[in-house]
Amino acid sequence: MRKSVDEAIARFEHHTFAGLHLEKLHAAEDPNVRTIRIDGGRRGIVLKPETGDVYCLIAVMEHDAAIKYAKSRRFSVNQRLGVLEVRDATALAQVRPALDALARTQPERLFAAYGDGELINLGLDADVLPIVRLLTSEDHLAALESMLPEPQYLALVALASGMTPQEAWEEICRLLPDASPPPAVDTSDLVTAMERSPGDVVFVSGPDELAQMLAHPFDLWRVFLHPAQRRLALRPSYNGAVQVTGGAGTGKTVTALHRARHLAERGSPVLVTTFTTTLADTLDDQLDLLIDDPDVRARIEVVNIDKLSYRIVKDAAGHNPKIAGGAEIQALWNIAISQTETPYSAAFLHREWEQVILAQDLSGREAYLGSTRRGRGKGLSPAQREKAWAAISRFLELLAETGARTHMQIAAEAARVLAAEAAPRYRHIIVDEAQDLYPAQWRILRAAVAPGPDDLFIVGDPHQRIYDHRVSLKSLGITVTGRSHKLKLSYRTTAEILNWAVRLLGVEPVAGLDDRQDSLAGYRSSLHGRRPVVQGFPDRDAELDALVEQVRAWLDAGVEPHAIGIATRFLSAAGRTERALAAAGIGTASLAAGGSAQDSVRVGTMHRMKGLEFRCVAVTGVSADAMPAAVVLTDPDEDPATHADDVQRERCLLFVACTRARDALYVSHTGAPSPFLPTRAR
């Protein structure tokens, strides 16, 4: 499509009469809208102002969709902000009779408290105002989001949320780069309106400049800030900690990165942290792409939370702390259980230790026996707690004898080191994928930055929680009440992929970080594409052969190799996948090694896909014997509630892997499919 757009622009520019290539539409809502042929099946929608030689390519769509879009939209200039607006004039006309009928049955109107003058001062125009007067609920307003001009819709949302007209005005002014509206607006000057819309319109003088802009389209996509995200990222200041949640692809990470740049541009040092090393490396790369000023970039430190805690403890102790490996920890638990004759499994006791004792920084037996066990499924009597403590304390003795510590022990020690220091180390901290951090790690961050304006900017999605813990920010001294925001529009994933992937999550409620249940209600995408492809195969060899064919098809279609991601449930399967692709002459880079070569397809486990995004994604091995993975499931007889949590976490893991895709999703399995897959997709 990019190549076809380049060629169409070239034909358009070099023709002696540019208008020859533009087609006017019969019965269009906007007389300034035209279409242009891109290739055999696609057309571009072009805005042609009445005067001048500036033409704006609005969108490229399949022929019928382009004609429908072009006929229904009308472009205008916001009479107060002076920015370019677009409205679905056809849809607004169609919905008005229904709103009128509903309004006659309701005594209350949503905006009855505001006069016409107040609404006009917020930028509402004569066409929108009569429809606004018919609204009786916020649900009706939300239903109009895709139809109304965005600045006018945002002004109405601000009022509906309880803001005063002045506060609403200040909120919508943030749409402008300098938050300052022009002293006068010419509503007939579309070109000037485009110039005031730098987040939405890019000016190019011809095909060469266009080609340069699109040279690395996927990288630019990953740091592009959409208007809904811009308001959160570039707000001058917040009074305290801020939480931004939203489903996959809603732009939480890019919002966090722009917030980091915004704070650094004010001269303040900023820490950006997350759970995994892979994601930390990706955030580092994206900041390099986003920030040109070396002084600003130097003020932002990116480090994953384990590395941060390790460094704090190392500096305090004067030597490198020794890390206990997984096999060593398992062996010590087995010894402790045998010596104390405790009737609990190693997995149960390890969770009890991490999620209760370390989470609350409990100092000993009495503290544990008297503690609350929030988030733990199985209740324990006092006698049962005594037995659990006997095994846990013995495990800790055995671990201490080795001189090694677990990552969570080091995190707890790092938090104590920071809490004892005279002053916090940081002024601002940005936390990405916040749902994955453990309580001990949150205590590090709370101690590392003083409570106050812009201290913590927290982004995450409880529906993407793939690690075994629960956190209450309030209990850790982090309050986000009144400063929680939700992003609902997915800018990455198509509606077809999104609607399919949401069904992977099942129907279990999900707990948020603010002690409330989190919902994906209203989560949607305005992008459209092909439905996910789900294929079954008799054996692994056949599955790998088909995967190679699919990857080659994506590459032949012009997809950049690094924009293709392949996810597996287990590391061994990722290795087999890399070898199969290499045998076919396709270069790969392992996510586990932090590979980022531009000429390599990225391959890794579902866990390593966390926080990343690709144009095309293949998720393989989604079979009944792998998803859910039996090895991570608690025995339902030992703890049915924890077993249910384990299953839900596996659902979230598959959801995370599938929603890394922007344009295309391919899912495969051998034998029986995973029970998580939607029935119609099997």
Image (cartoon, rainbow, N blue to C red):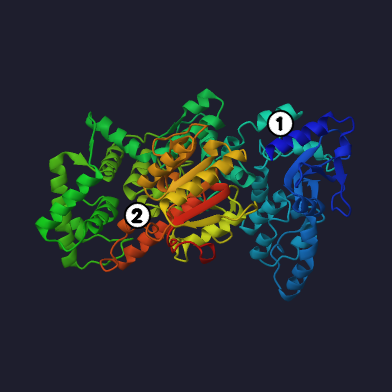
Q: Which residue is mark 1?
A: 210
Task: Report the residue marked by disc 2.
Answer: 469
For marks 1 and 2 on the same chain, the one whose residue lies earlier in the sequence? 1
Q: CA distance from mark 1 to mark 2?
A: 47 Å
Label 1 residue SS: helix
Residue 410 left/right relative to 662: left
- Left or right? Give the position of 386 relative to 374: left
- Asked which quadrant contains residue 353, the reply is bottom left
Residue shown at 32% from the left, 56% from the top: 632
Quadrant of the rendering where the N terminus is positioned = top right
Q: Quadrant of residue 355?
A: bottom left
State the SS at label 2. loop
Q: Are marks 1 and 2 in contact (CB under 8 Å)?
A: no
Between 292 and 516, the residue placed more toward the observer is 292
Q: Percent x, y for residue 94? A: 79, 64
Identity, as a three-letter code, of the amino acid under mark 2: His
Q: Position of residue 473 (x, y in %)?
A: 40, 52
Task: Please identify, in this view, whether the residue under mark 1 or under mark 2 is nearer the observer.
Answer: 1
